[in-house]
Amino acid sequence: MTKRITVVGLGSSDFEQMPIGVYRKLKNAKCLFLRTKEHPVVNSLLGEGIKFQTFDRDYETNEQFEEVYEQIVKKLFAMVKDEDVTYAVPGHPLVAERTVQLLLKRAKEEQCEVVIEGGQSFFDAMFTALKIDPIEGFQFLDGTALHESDYHLNQHVIIGQVYDAFIASEVKLTLMERLPDDYEVVIVTAAGSSEEQIKKVPLYELDHVAELSNLTSVYIPPVQKEELLYQEFQTLRGVISALRGPNGCPWDREQTHESLKKYLVEETYEVLDAIEKGDDDLLVEELGDVLLQVMLHAQIGEDEGFFSINDVIRAITEKMIRRHPHVFANVSVESAEDVVANWDEIKRKEKKTEQEKSILDGIPQELPSLYRAFELQKKAAKVGFDWIEVEPMWAKVNEELKEFQEETIRANKEKLEKEFGDIIFALVNIARYYKIDPEEGLRATNLKFYNRFRFIEEKVKEKGYDIQKMSLQELDLLWEEAKQHNI
């Protein structure tokens, strides 16, 4: 005969508010266990002559809550082998009760029937105590496993399981990722009972409250200040939609994918400039400008009915998971080189169905020429079209230099451009051999030239001279001085 564990809820408030059906279940139970004696109805149950055992000692002998819950479930399944068991939990059995979920999950393998009976959840008491309407938007979250991305700032948020100061501290730090330190939150203890306590505190004092217990929850009111929602993705999405809407900005409404191309390139280079300067505040601003371009393109796609930002996010998420099997699947890697090799192999298989005439076709024509030369050579090298030693590369550079010099005699501009391009292309090969990014190398030289020339300008200004009237020899002396100052 199948054994049975009957789970009932003690509710969240006093004995007088306990449903009569639940009381009878407790009264008639031959083998009754309470998850904890820390509940407003416990003294009344004792007064009614109801005998029970609790699992409070398991909380004392285990460091982690999950260990406690595992231990409780293990004991319940062991006890039910001898006789049917009634298990009583605070609130409703299916609201924030990990032990009940574990019982339901393992009931079949334990050949035991788990029956869920009534019980009043603490939600009604919380809504009454806080005087809020959940239809406005409501979230109930676990304080022991809270992540800053879990909660919505524009909804009512109740965080349960805030048992002690440690959990309260973790909750506080998580909330501070998105809320001001002095944002007012509400601590509710024993909601709906005669011992109900409601205390409003600034967020930074959340873990300084003297009394926290298993009856404590934290309420986060919806954010009303519009400025606090500026960091939310949906706020940005709404702004871009409004700019492109019927009553939006005339300039934004006129933009197309084609017209925005140059801005994406410009903003990308401004990000690189911010990185070069090591300016984090500037980097935040410039990354925002790049994100703006992404959002505008996505909004245009949505306006035209082809795609939305959700499709963009889905596509990149799928790609990252697919191309990182060493993180999201069971593939093993030993080094960063293995990661790159795996990435290239997965990418090659993905592109197999595409009608590419050449392995070089995947390199965008719009890349800066120096970058494109680097990528073209890299792709060709992957199929063996590359020198192994550096000497032939230097020979090629010298060969191209000679051909350029010879072409200068004929002064054919078109041919000179091509021969000059050959020199740069050959030098890119050298850079690749020494694992140098040629674009970054040239960028560093440009910056060095800029700083040294600025030094010359400042020195000329200090001397009260006119730079346009100075000789090359005079300017070159200042250039050498800049070099001596490691500029």
Image (tube, rainbow, N blue to C red):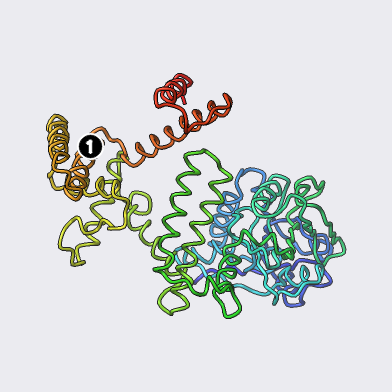
Disc 1 marks a residue whose amino acid type is: Leu
Toward which corner of the image does residue 394 lie, by quadrant?
Answer: top left
In the rendered image, which residue does mark 1 sit on? 427
Give the image location of residue 451, x and y in percent: 48, 32
Q: Is residue 89 left or right of residue 481?
A: right
Seen in the picture, residue 365 relative to 95 is either above or below; the reply is above
Q: Is residue 249 left or right of residue 200?
A: left
Give the image location of residue 50, x and y in percent: 77, 64
Which residue sits at x=23%, y=53%? 345
* Foreground pick, 456 / 61: 456
* Foreground pick, 191 / 88: 191
Which residue sits at x=68%, y=68%? 155
Seen in the picture, residue 20 relative to 337 is either above or below; the reply is below
* Foreground pick, 186 / 119: 186
Give the image location of residue 453, x and y in percent: 46, 32
Toward which corner of the image does residue 83 lie, by quadrant?
Answer: bottom right
Which residue sits at x=74%, y=61%? 219
Toward which corner of the image does residue 404 lie, by quadrant?
Answer: top left
Give the image location of residue 147, x and y in percent: 59, 54
Which residue sits at x=38%, y=34%? 445
Extreme residue toward the right, this view: 194
Q: Secondary structure at mark 1?
A: helix
Seen in the picture, residue 75 relative to 278 is either above or below; the reply is below
Q: Is residue 87 left or right of residue 444?
A: right
Q: Is residue 200 left or right of residue 458?
A: right
**How packed is label 1: few (under 14 Cα within 10 Å), some, or many (20 or more)?**
many
Seen in the picture, residue 484 relative to 277 is either above or below; the reply is above
